[in-house]
């Protein structure tokens, strides 16, 4: 296997996650909108999701996940020299969520930035974090994927097509130069197809004349997500295998060489469709969509943290992570577990 054209291999030395305690089941949703447990379960595999209580912010969830990742890596906040926050549900229009998190971590002038690549944000973050460390610019990066999506959902019949899908969560990893050159991020490939911005997104507030939040916009649901579900589904099932195959080819690996598959959790049917087509054994796939729904940029780091804490990964295991989201953005990352 070859590394991402970089000389310095970059490892994940700690993981952490946070989900709000409030569980919202499919039955809970069916009491407030025209949906059913059967419809949601059959179409998506989702059984329940977590929603924050009033007042909890993205940086609160990100802080909890970050503190756990730092503890797992044996580090304190001041050991971090750069922060990346992947999110589609920012704390404010500006400044970025990273600023709020940095302050809550008690840091003084540590730099950082937000990554706006939606559900693929964590994979994009791996690519950016790896490059920043491999270039020698930074040594320890905190990469967080965080979403509070429940507040933007239309919890009425009108919004049922998206309201049932999304949940709130945060996941974090610490990136550092790997001590063992065999371990770490081997290859990340990201892609973007901007012509499909009309298929998935949230319009308001927008820095386009006439599109800033106005009273009449509240009636149009432009501040809630829009999605052409079938179109997104079709693109997800073709783009993710495409980029996975690119990564495998680049690393001279086959499907059978991968020990653990972490797919974005937008819809269990998407992942089943892909894994059947690629002949991936179900026991090598870890899902958590049934518990949390689609947590967008937080999905992959929460999957990873649950696997790490359950002892499901051991040094030398090859982990394939892949995501697809609004933008459209997608990507895949191959990581050899260990530091
Ligand atoms: N409960 C009950 N019925 C519903 C619901 C609901 N929550 N939502 C929609 N329906 C109805 C529709 O109104 C429609 O009714 P009709 O036939 O009378 O018109 C029927 O169910 C079928 O609707 P479809 O949208 O055609 O359902 P589909 O089989 O496509 O499943 C789904 C919808 C689950 C959303 C699917 O299209 C999907 O998962 N798409 C991909 C989502 C995704 O990958 N998102 C990307 C990540 S998100 C991000 O990046 C931010």
Image (cartoon, helix red, strand yellow):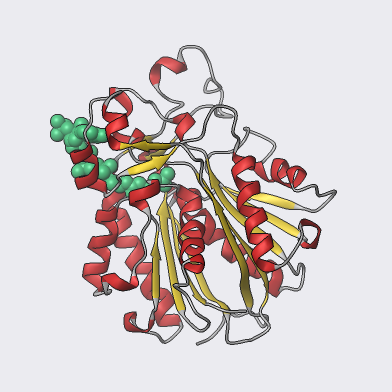
Determine if residue 15 is in view: yes
Q: Quadrant of ligand 1?
A: top left
Q: Is residue 319 left or right of residue 284?
A: right
Instruction: State the image coordinates of residue 94 (x, y, percent, origin top left).
Output: 67, 35
Q: Is residue 225 above or below residue 187?
A: above
Instruction: State the image coordinates of residue 152 (x, y, percent, origin top left).
Output: 46, 30
Who's the residue at 50% across and 51% down the image? 297
Q: Is residue 260 left or right of residue 314?
A: left
Instruction: State the image coordinates of residue 82 (x, y, percent, origin top left).
Output: 74, 58
Q: Residue furthest right?
A: 108
Q: Is residue 77 left or right of residue 146?
A: right
Who's the residue at 78% across and 61% down the image? 81
Q: Nearer the viewer, residue 161 or 206?
A: 161
Q: Is residue 112 above or below residue 189?
A: above
Give residue 153's quadrant in the image: top left
Q: Nearer the viewer, residue 263 or 52?
A: 52
Q: Nearer the viewer, residue 118 or 339?
A: 339
Who's the residue at 32% across and 56% down the image? 236
Determine if residue 231 is in view: no
Q: Nearer the viewer, residue 227 or 298?
A: 298
Q: Is residue 7 left or right of residue 296?
A: right
Instruction: State the image coordinates of residue 28 (x, y, percent, origin top left).
Output: 31, 30
Who's the residue at 50% across and 27% down the image? 204
Which quadrant is the C terminus positioned in? bottom right
Report the number of numbered marks. Answer: 0
């Amino acid at each position: 296997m070859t590394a991402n054209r970089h000389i310095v291999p970059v490892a994940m030395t700690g993981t952490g996650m946070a989900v709000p305690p409030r569980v919202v089941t499919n039955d809970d949703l069916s009491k407030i909108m025209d949906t059913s447990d059967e419809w949601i379960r059959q179409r998506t595999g989702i059984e329940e999701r977590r929603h924050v209580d009033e007042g909890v912010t993205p940086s609160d969830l990100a802080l909890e996940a970050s503190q756990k990742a730092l503890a797992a890596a044996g580090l304190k906040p001041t050991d971090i020299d750069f922060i990346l926050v992947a999110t589609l549900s920012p704390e404010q229009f500006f400044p970025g969520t990273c600023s709020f998190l940095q302050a809550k971590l008690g840091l003084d002038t540590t730099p950082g930035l937000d990554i706006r690549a939606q559900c693929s944000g964590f994979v994009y973050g791996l690519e950016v974090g790896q490059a920043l460390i491999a270039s020698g610019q930074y040594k320890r990066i905190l990469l967080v994927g965080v979403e509070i999506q429940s507040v933007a959902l239309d919890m009425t019949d009108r919004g049922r097509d998206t309201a049932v899908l999304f949940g709130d969560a945060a996941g974090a990893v610490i990136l550092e130069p790997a001590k063992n050159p065999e371990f770490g991020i081997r290859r990340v490939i990201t892609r973007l197809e901007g012509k499909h911005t009309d298929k998935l997104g949230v319009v308001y507030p927008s820095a386009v004349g006439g599109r800033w939040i106005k009273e009449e916009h509240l009636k149009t649901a432009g501040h809630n997500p829009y999605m052409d579900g079938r179109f997104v589904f079709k693109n997800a099932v073709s783009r993710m295998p495409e980029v996975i195959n690119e990564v495998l080819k680049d690393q001279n690996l086959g499907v059978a060489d991968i020990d653990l598959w972490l797919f974005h959790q937008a819809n269990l049917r998407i992942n089943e469709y892909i894994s059947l087509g690629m002949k991936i054994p179900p026991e090598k796939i870890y899902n958590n969509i049934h518990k949390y729904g689609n947590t967008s940029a937080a999905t992959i780091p929460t999957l990873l943290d649950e696997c790490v804490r359950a002892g499901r990964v051991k040094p030398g295991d090859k982990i394939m992570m892949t995501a697809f989201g609004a933008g459209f953005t997608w990507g895949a990352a191959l990581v050899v577990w260990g530091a």
